[in-house]
């Protein structure tokens, strides 16, 4: 009788525990990757406390967490105390709450449990399985996260923090548009906003959305990088060039909230990329497509999904060391002059194909999906060519000789 | 009619006293009056009978109303904006509670995510201290309080008349056939509506509705916004054009 | 532009044109792949870190490293220094303090009664080594210099001589002249 209450609570507890652990260990992975790319070894000494056992440095996240907790938490005298406290909390809660609609696998089949538990329906691996708005909910929480940035910058009452807050919120708001445009095509093809439905659709057709809508994939990926404030779009922080950004004045546990939220944004972005474009838990010949599955397949789906997510996260981390940071005007130029038009083109292409594609494919004898894939790849190449020729982000920002002198 | 009118009056006077222009003692009195009015109003709220749904509804409603009150009475404009955002979140929660998922999420994205952030930008850039004198001189306070009172009164009257028939029939010993039929159709209509809203693909239904019956209105609204955008771009471009000829230097 | 060049007061200023990106550069694709391959190559390359407390960092040639000082001894085990103050004079950090006394030995006039180097003030520039006429003071390749107090880091004569005893086998004195005055040119050992 209490089951409908216990199930979501259990899921929430598991999710938050898993997320916090994942964030801590992803910091370790990030540091490893950073070190390896720079020909260093990275953290490898902290193992089990009070022993000499090192375990490749797997104790490092615990040490980091303890350090953050016990570090002096300094609140400057001039800050707005209330908002200074609320801002990191906002971004942290928003980052966690976004996972409510993200599926971590497909379902757990009901026959896995003893019959006395009275579970008849397969348990879906989403915290809020009934939410029909799915992906839009993630967007809503993304727009809440902007508050953490703006308020943190303002409440610090420090010019650097304030400018950092403006800088980052302008970036976040600008890239919300291409982010939305990137998924429009996916939603159109699927006919639903629910993430599990989107995976289901890809599993049934067998062609992931990255093949059918490569343009949307590029737009979404770039926007996701910018939203997660990862290099090459990490202008909010830009640790080598600028003062710390909106969290200049933060320390201790509040700084940790910002850091963890940043990492969770990256994890959310990776999950969304995998679910929307890389087929979610689907893999050819491994996972099947239907909802009625045995438990090995259910487990396999979770593994496939998490493996894909991890691969995308590793790409995020490698990208950090592969390409130089964009300048701020280039960042804005890419957002407004490249990504938004591309997103619109993708949207129009998909909508047109949905309307007239059926008759066309009937004429040529292809399947619907493969014809969309061909159209999509063509659109991507054409768009990329056009942008390369026009080069709208090129701005002559070098000092020019003053023409007045000659007159 | 006595209690609702008293509630409204109390609320109006309380808010008038609470507005940022007043003295601290006046604001305290106003706060007490407004809280009393809130309690009186809340006591007349019809309950559903399920403790969880009722509890959540009361919490969300209280959050919404109290933060809306704070949004107009706080001195620091940045705080006002934050309270407004809080009130929007409460509203979104109420929408979610009644099954209108898309509306809830759209409220957050459009109002909290876009409009309010723009407000915050302007507020922060304009006056980081938040203590400008012209913010405190709100001479139209009594007018605003009165207008708010009328607004809330008319709305509750309208909503009350919609909800009224059901308890009236229950209380009546001998309901007329006509009234019973009316009630039956009203209940049927409401059930049909809730079925429509709570159906698993209500977003698709909303989309059909928006782009079917209300297509013209939607397109007109979109066109209006687009024209406004172009206008803003034109204004900005003109301002820049004057400075452009000599390479941005003056 | 040509007009500008004649009349411009900035005659010595050359305006360099921004290098134009080619098509491959503008399309980002080639550069994108280049960046990724570089990163991947380094990801799997051999790491250069020395895990310090467990492994010692090997200094390939002690002659090119300037670490802790030592005071050399001559063949009879006496301190080589003749207390001429050249090192203290040369020292830019003023970290060498010598008290000279009359030498008990017949082959020199003075010897250092005390010889202290404040290792915390020292900037390890090696000027003392350059200045010394008798090659009595040298910088070894010991780099892990640490102590628990400031006093501990002020090295006196005994300690500097003990550094010599510690390091003389690995790093023989780079002596060009043995003893105080006799000349015995010998190339550096390494």
Image (cartoon, helix red, strand yellow):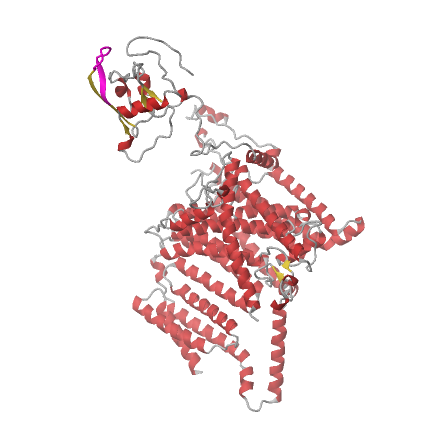
Q: Is residue C21 above or below residue A183?
A: above
Q: Report x, y in % for residue A402.
A: 45, 32
* The residue positioned farthest toward the front in the image shown: C76
- Residue at x-position 78% and y-position 49%: A366
User: Quick one: C91 or B221, which is closer to the camera?
Assistant: C91
Q: Residue at x 59, y 48 (%)?
A: A309
Magenta span has A286? no
Residue toward you, A345 or A75: A75
Image quadrant containing the N terminus of chain A: bottom right
Q: How far across and how far down the image is residue B12, in percent?
A: 40, 73
Point out the stretch of residues depicted in magenta: C103-114
Q: Point out residue B67 in the picture as x, y percentages from the top left corner.
A: 43, 65
Does any portion of residue A208 appear in the rendered image?
yes
Q: Which residue is pictured at 32% across the width and 33% down the height?
A: C147
Expressed as whole percent of the image width and height from the top left, the position of residue A113 reads: 62, 63
Q: Quadrant of the C terminus of chain A?
A: top left
Please indicate whether residue A358 sits to the left or right of residue C24 in the image: right
Looking at the image, residue C146 sits to the left or right of residue C35; the answer is left
């Amino acid at each position: 009788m209490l089951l409908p209450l216990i199930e979501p609570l259990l899921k929430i507890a598991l999710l938050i525990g898993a997320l916090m652990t994942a964030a801590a260990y992803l910091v370790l992975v990030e540091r490893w990757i950073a070190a390896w790319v720079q020909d260093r070894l990275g953290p490898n000494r902290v193992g089990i406390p009070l022993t000499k056992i090192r375990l490749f440095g797997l104790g490092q996240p615990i040490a980091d967490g303890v350090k953050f907790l016990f570090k002096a938490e300094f609140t400057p005298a001039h800050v707005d105390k209330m908002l200074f406290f609320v801002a990191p909390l906002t971004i942290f809660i928003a980052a966690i709450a976004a996972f409510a609609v993200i599926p971590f696998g497909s379902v757990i089949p009901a026959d896995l449990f003893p019959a006395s538990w009275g579970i008849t329906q397969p348990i879906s691996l989403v915290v809020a399985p009934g939410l029909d708005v799915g992906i839009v909910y993630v967007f809503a929480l993304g727009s809440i996260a902007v508050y953490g940035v703006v308020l943190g910058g303002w409440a610090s009452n420090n010019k650097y923090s304030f400018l950092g807050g403006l800088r980052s919120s302008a970036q976040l708001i600008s890239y919300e548009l291409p982010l939305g445009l990137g998924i429009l095509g996916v939603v159109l093809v699927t006919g639903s906003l629910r993430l599990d439905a989107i995976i289901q659709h890809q599993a049934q057709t067998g062609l992931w959305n990255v093949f059918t809508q490569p343009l949307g994939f590029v737009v979404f990926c770039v926007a996701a990088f910018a939203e997660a404030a990862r290099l090459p779009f990490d202008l909010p922080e830009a640790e080598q060039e600028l003062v710390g950004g909106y969290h200049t004045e933060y320390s201790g546990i509040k700084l940790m909230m910002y850091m963890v939220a940043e990492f969770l944004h990256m994890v959310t972005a990776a999950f969304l990329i995998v679910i929307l474009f890389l087929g979610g838990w689907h893999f050819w010949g491994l996972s099947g497509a239907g909802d009625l599955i045995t438990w090995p397949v259910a487990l396999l789906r979770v593994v496939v999904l998490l493996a894909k997510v991890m691969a995308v996260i590793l790409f995020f981390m490698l990208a950090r060391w592969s390409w130089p940071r964009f300048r701020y005007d280039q960042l804005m130029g890419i957002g407004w002059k490249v990504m938004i038009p591309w997103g619109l083109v993708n949207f129009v292409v998909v909508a047109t194909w949905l309307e007239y594609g059926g008759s066309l494919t009937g004429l040529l004898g292809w399947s619907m999906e493969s014809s969309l894939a061909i159209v999509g790849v063509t659109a991507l190449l054409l768009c990329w060519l056009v942008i390369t020729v026009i080069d709208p982000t090129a701005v002559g920002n070098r000092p020019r000789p003053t023409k007045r002198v000659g007159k | 009619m006595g209690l609702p009118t008293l509630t409204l009056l109390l609320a109006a006077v309380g808010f008038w006293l609470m507005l940022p222009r007043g003295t601290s003692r006046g604001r305290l009195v106003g706060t007490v009056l407004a809280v009393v009015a809130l309690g009186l109003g809340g006591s007349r709220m019809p309950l559903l009978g399920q403790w969880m749904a009722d509890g959540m509804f009361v919490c969300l409603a209280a959050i919404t109303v109290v933060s809306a009150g704070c949004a107009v009475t706080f001195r620091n404009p940045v705080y006002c904006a934050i309270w407004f955002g809080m009130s929007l979140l409460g509203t979104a929660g109420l929408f979610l509670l009644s099954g209108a998922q898309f509306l809830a999420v759209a409220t957050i994205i459009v109002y909290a995510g876009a409009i309010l952030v723009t407000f915050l930008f302007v507020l922060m850039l304009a006056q980081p201290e938040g203590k400008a004198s012209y913010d405190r001189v709100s001479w139209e306070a009594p007018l605003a309080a009165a207008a708010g009172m009328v607004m809330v009164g008319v709305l509750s009257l309208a909503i009350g008349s919609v909800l009224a028939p059901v308890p009236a029939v229950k209380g009546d010993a001998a309901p007329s056939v006509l009234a019973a039929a009316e009630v039956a159709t009203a209940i049927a209509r409401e059930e049909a509506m809730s079925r429509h809203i709570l159906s698993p693909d209500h977003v698709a239904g909303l989309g059909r509705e928006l782009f079917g019956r209300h297509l013209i209105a939607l397109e007109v609204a979109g066109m209006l916004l687009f024209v406004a955008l172009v206008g803003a771009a034109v204004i900005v471009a003109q301002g820049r054009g004057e400075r452009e000829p000599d390479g941005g230097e003056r | 532009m040509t007009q500008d060049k004649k009349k411009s007061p900035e005659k010595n200023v050359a305006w360099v044109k921004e290098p134009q990106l080619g098509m491959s550069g503008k399309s980002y694709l080639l550069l994108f792949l280049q960046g990724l391959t570089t990163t991947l190559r380094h990801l799997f390359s051999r790491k250069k870190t020395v895990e310090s407390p467990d492994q010692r960092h090997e200094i390939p040639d002690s002659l090119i490293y300037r670490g802790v000082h030592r005071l050399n001894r001559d063949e009879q085990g006496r301190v080589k220094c003749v207390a001429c103050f050249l090192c203290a004079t040369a020292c830019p950090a003023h970290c060498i303090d010598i008290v000279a006394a009359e030498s008990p030995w017949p082959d020199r006039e003075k010897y250092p009664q005390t010889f202290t180097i404040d290792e915390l003030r020292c900037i390890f520039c090696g000027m003392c080594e350059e200045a010394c006429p008798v090659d009595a003071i040298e910088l070894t390749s010991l780099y892990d210099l640490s102590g628990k107090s400031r006093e501990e880091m002020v090295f006196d004569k005994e300690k500097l001589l003990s550094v010599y005893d510690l390091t003389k086998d690995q790093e023989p004195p780079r002596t060009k002249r043995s003893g105080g005055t006799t000349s015995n040119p010998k190339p550096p050992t390494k």
